Amino acid sequence: MAQQLGFDLPSRTALGRDAFFVAPSNAMALAMIDNWQNWASRKLALTGPAGSGKTHLTHVWADMAGAQIVTANDLAQADIPTLAQSPIAVEDIPLIAQDTDAQTALFHLHNLVLAEGHALLLTGEAPVSQWALTLPDLKSRIQGATAVALDPPDDALLSALLVKLLADRQLTPKPDLIPYLLTRMDRSFAAAIDLIERLDTVSIALKRPVTRALAAQVLDNGTPSA
């Protein structure tokens, strides 16, 4: 059988509901997203570490709710009244902890979107209590939202994430690759994302397939030679 070599193909990230792998660490968050029409006060704060699935769930929710997605950093220049005309997801709230203009814009968006009868999804890596917002009225409103966290991954979820990351890059691993990676990698979402990116980059550069042998060299030495 011919080996699968690395080619510089475009990465296509699957963000649909069917591509989201359900595990104990994320089941509660997914249930809250699925039940979005019954959110208390029509708002939810979704938290979890980088790569944990926040963006994926945000896109799942946006598709179900007909919502727009905006990054918190962009709010100061955004047309807030227009954004408030539909459900809205605001990602990476902690990034505006020192940005008074963006916090003020979020405060007005929060009030307008709820006044219009729409739903509001807010995301950030840390728990809401650690978002360090400095605008008191905004802080109190966000801390009043129901919050749900994506927990650290177990083996089943990490395995599924690795397979998905490889599939997004149009790579199909041999059966021995994923179990091997699980025994050697740092056990976090961010580490999984970084590892697959490095494997793909090295595979393309060296024109070698993504195998256990290549993974061992990347994990041991960083960038192996041809």
Image: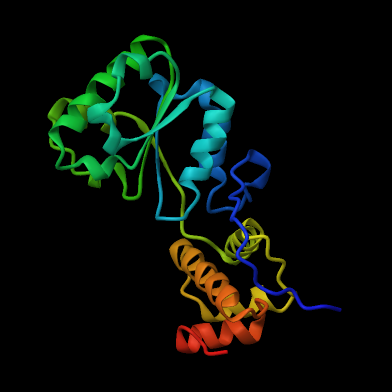
Q: Is residue 169 left or right of residue 33?
A: right
Nearer the observer, 148 or 135: 135
Name, please, the residue furthest toward the top: 116
Residue at screen point 72% across, 66% down: 172
Looking at the image, is 199 positioned above or below residue 126? below
Q: Quadrant of residue 8?
A: bottom right
Q: How is the image coloured?
A: rainbow
Pick the front one: 94 or 82 = 82
Q: Residue at x 59, y 73 (%)?
A: 204
Residue 96, percent across and down? Answer: 22, 40
Give the quarter of the figure containing the N terminus. Answer: bottom right
Q: Indicate left or right for 120 with 226 as reference.
A: left
Measured from the top left, where is residue 134 in percent x and y? Answer: 13, 37
Image height of 222 relative to 148, above or below: below
Look at 22% across and 25% down and name the residue there.
105
Q: How many numbered marks does the figure carry?
A: 0
